[in-house]
Amino acid sequence: MTGVCIGIDLGGTFIKFALLDEGMSVRGKFQSPTPAEAGPDGVVEAMISGAKKLLDREGLSGGEVVGVGIGSPGPLDLDAGVVIGIPNIPGFVNIPLRRLVSEGLGAPAVLENDANAAALGEYLCGSGEGTSVMVMLTLGTGIGSGIVIDGRLVRGAHGIGAEVGHTIVEPEGEPCPCGQRGCLERYTSASALGRYARRLIEQDRRDSSLADVLRSKGNLDAADVNEARKAGDDLAAEVWDRAVGYLAVGCVNLARLLDPDLIVFGGGMAKAGGDLMEPLTEQFKRLHWSIAEPKTTLALASLGNDAGLIGAAGAAWKQFGSGESR
Amino acid sequence: MTGVCIGIDLGGTFIKFALLDEGMSVRGKFQSPTPAEAGPDGVVEAMISGAKKLLDREGLSGGEVVGVGIGSPGPLDLDAGVVIGIPNIPGFVNIPLRRLVSEGLGAPAVLENDANAAALGEYLCGSGEGTSVMVMLTLGTGIGSGIVIDGRLVRGAHGIGAEVGHTIVEPEGEPCPCGQRGCLERYTSASALGRYARRLIEQDRRDSSLADVLRSKGNLDAADVNEARKAGDDLAAEVWDRAVGYLAVGCVNLARLLDPDLIVFGGGMAKAGGDLMEPLTEQFKRLHWSIAEPKTTLALASLGNDAGLIGAAGAAWKQFGSGESR
């Protein structure tokens, strides 16, 4: 089957576009600023016109478009193809995005949440190629996650599954805005580390080189903590190790429940690379059962910020392709 | 398609047999003692002769057997159809059970672990009928568990998934024979409650009516604890509530990861019925996020000790049937 699928990744700052052929090769990419100030109509129009521009640039007509995959922040109503709301785009509420984009581009469309799209991207074209069970964790402000089993995203019975960041790793632990206590993302995410370091400095009056960083920047994130840790700061080391330890608990629990070939890590905290993966793998092995060696590998994601874009196009191929890509 | 599938549930005390038609109706059941003393050959022979006896009794010939499903304790090598070992049947080590039973009955066979078979049974014919995502937890000596998504058991990439009892609910918690710490089954299983009550009485010298029970019986189990709790024993109430609390954490984590329609409970501790389900549902709601009402229902299993038997036959229909039952 010839033709392409269009992937569109809707973010608060940029809208990204890519064309993928059925072999999952990227035929062209493009991005444009998200015109949040233009309201929902303007944003949808930018999605449609950007995709058309990319098709033109690559010398393709609309007739060659097999389908469109849209990755969007949520919450979403996946069955209805509706965006319930996007925190970073004011007014983008109850928008039937799947239908609007499909009509605008004259091709069938599928809507997917951005974390699921990223997981599918890594599974199809990134670190997860060739696996049968893969979990992706994006360690950003919170933890985005997606689970792929035998090529299919695990969405759950009501479309609210695969929320690894809201599994409880500390009973009666830190309160989470979701209403639970002790959620993994309260301990391990790009922002959780900075928040915890700040609390130790401000409330517990602990000494740390991070106090100066906090004064000058006004906040702290995982990168600040890792930098201070590498420069020998004890508090930073404690904060980093704690976050890694809880993440390792989350990984053991994924190994026990889903037995993945691979758990891949993306997002701000994963930019630490080996500084994350080495202690994480060590903690994972330590906490993991001893009746058998760990069979789950932990690795960095490889598609960077394009994972969601490629996964969105991949989702379209899965849904509208001839079957080879399913 | 006419015909039947045979389900055989191999246990340490009994071997159970059932015939299921494709509509998942039981056409006959039968059980015989497990001749553990006769060694592996004798046990396999008893499985074959018992199945033949049941077919005879129901007036069926071997030609009407579409397939055989075998549920067995583990560990198993599912791909190879081999039982690696069964703790309660000495010498039952590295037995190619799938091939032996298939040859003995002249029909294709499938081997499934007993917890998965029980989950499939509840999904096909029990409390889980009509669900799309279901988890079953059998609260016995440990916790057996099975996960069904869209009619398929979740086995994982290496066949070691769906071990809910070995997810960590208390980081650096009680040591588990598996080598991990803080596994759910160390806190919540028919035996875990008795063990904890005993520790409080013997080591912590706590007062409880259970001290007398312990002296006369030599041990304690979940039923003892529940009975004492209902008679007003404070220590028993504390032990029961703690186990229920950890189980609720496990249920929240299943809700976040897999978003099941239903989690069903079987095994010794579930015999407490409403005494388990009422506080469990209450704790589940308390610990569950508040951004949306729980969509996962918690309920008792309905097939009792036959779940594994029926699930084994159901697994055979799924694998060897015409397709309607898949």
Image (cartoon, coloured by chain):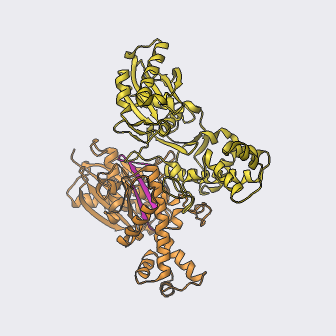
Chain colours: A orange, B yellow
The answer to whether residue A151 is magenta is yes
- In the image, taking residue A178 as reference, residue A71 lies left or right, namely left
Q: In the rendered image, which quarter contains the C terminus of chain A?
A: top left
Instruction: State the residue in front, A187 or B290.
Output: A187
Residue at image coords 40%, 52%:
A292
Q: Main secondary structure of the magenta part?
A: strand
- In the image, B58: left or right of B281? left
- Residue A170 occupies which quadrant of the picture? bottom right
Give the magenta range.
A135-154
Depth order, front residue of A282/A4? A282
Nearer the observer, B306 or A260: B306
Answer above or below: position of B44 versus B236: above
Q: Is residue B131 visible?
A: yes
> How many marks do you count on the picture?
0
Q: Which corner quadrant holds the N terminus of chain A?
A: top left
Q: Residue furthest left?
A: A59
Look at the image and tell me whether residue B277 can be seen.
no
Looking at the image, is B204 positioned above or below residue B106? Answer: below
Side of A181 where B60 appears, left or right: left
Q: Position of residue B173 (x, y in %)?
A: 57, 60
Q: Is residue A249 magenta?
A: no
Q: Is residue B7 left or right of residue B199?
A: left
Which percent across, then down, holds residue A297?
Answer: 36, 58
Residue A250 placement (x, y as % from top left): 48, 59
Q: Residue furthest top?
A: B59
Quadrant of the rendered structure where residue A198 is?
Answer: bottom right
Q: Position of residue A93 (x, y in %)?
A: 51, 58
Residue that sits furthest to the front in the current view = B37
